[in-house]
Image (spheres, rainbow, N blue to C red):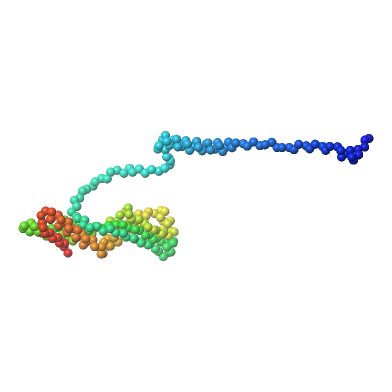
């Protein structure tokens, strides 16, 4: 049996260090999924653009179009006009229409603000000119004309320029609007607007004096072109 001394044990070389394990390097994979998705998107948009280039009328098949199939207007009659529209007044009327009940307005009530734009004409009716209304001097240099006083026409509300500015409805009124028609309400708004505009034309608008002045100038210019030097135009009271 051999005896190993401490000096001999220290003299032996140390055992070799085992090699360290290195994990294999991972290869970076190419994102083929993203590349494929990008190619598909480009192909779709490119295909749509190509189709639109080949077929210019390609559009949304669900889009609505409006086609006017109305026939031509039918002439019913022709009427000679013997009226001279000597002046026109243009008006704007705000109609504040309110419908209320014993219940609160938030439950049963309605308020509408309607902006109406309309006009009224001052008309001289020449069909009412009788015999003796025109007096001419012997030398045909002077003339005196007596005409009926201008009258005001009915107010005409411009549908294209008139509109509902604001409308507040109660709960029950809103429910009723789902099943009813608003034609009667619109008719009432236009009727009130016509009445208010006609009243405004009668009260201080100055349409009748302007119509008299315009008619007088028109007839004087016409008769002076025919050789009359003095033309007087009077209106019946």
* Image position of 3 (left or right of 118): right
Q: How many marks?
A: 0
* Image position of 122 (left or right of 54): left
Residue 6 seen anywhere in this rendered image of the structure: yes
* Image position of 193 (left or right of 219): right
What residue sits 46% from the left and 37% below the top? 48
- x, y (%) of residue 111? 39, 61
In the image shown, does 15 or 77 lie closer to the viewer?
Answer: 15
What residue sits 7% from the left and 59% below the top? 137
Residue 166 to residue 14: above or below: below
- x, y (%) of residue 156? 28, 56
Q: For residue 180, what is the image quadrant?
A: bottom left
- x, y (%) of residue 232? 13, 60
Q: For residue 2, what is the image quadrant?
A: top right
What residue sits 40% from the left and 38% below the top? 57
In the image shown, does 65 or 7 lie closer to the viewer?
Answer: 7
On-image quarter of the C terminus:
bottom left
On-image quarter of the N terminus:
top right
- x, y (%) of residue 195? 29, 60
In the image shown, does 168 or 200 lie closer to the viewer?
Answer: 200
């Amino acid at each position: 049996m051999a005896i190993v001394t401490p000096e001999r044990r220290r003299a032996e070389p140390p055992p070799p260090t085992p090699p360290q394990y290195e994990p294999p390097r991972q290869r970076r994979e190419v994102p083929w999924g993203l590349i494929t998705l990008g190619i598909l998107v480009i192909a779709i948009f490119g295909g749509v653009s190509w189709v639109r280039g080949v077929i210019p009328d390609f559009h949304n098949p669900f889009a609505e179009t409006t086609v006017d199939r109305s026939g031509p207007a039918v002439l019913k009659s022709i009427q000679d006009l013997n009226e001279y529209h000597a002046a026109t007044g243009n008006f704007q009327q705000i109609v504040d229409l309110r419908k209320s009940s014993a219940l609160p307005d938030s439950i049963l009530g309605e308020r509408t603000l309607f902006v109406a734009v309309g006009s009224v004409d001052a008309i001289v009716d020449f069909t009412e000119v009788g015999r003796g209304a025109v007096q001419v001097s012997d030398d045909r240099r002077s003339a005196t004309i007596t005409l009926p006083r201008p009258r005001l026409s009915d107010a005409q509300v411009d549908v294209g320029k008139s509109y509902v500015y604001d409308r507040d409805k109660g709960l029950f009124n809103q429910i009723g609007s789902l099943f009813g028609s608003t034609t009667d309400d619109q008719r009432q708004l236009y009727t009130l607007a016509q009445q208010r505009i006609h009243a405004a034309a009668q009260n201080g608008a100055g349409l009748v004096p302007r119509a008299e002045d315009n008619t007088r100038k028109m007839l004087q210019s016409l008769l002076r072109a025919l050789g009359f030097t003095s033309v007087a135009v009077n209106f019946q009271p």
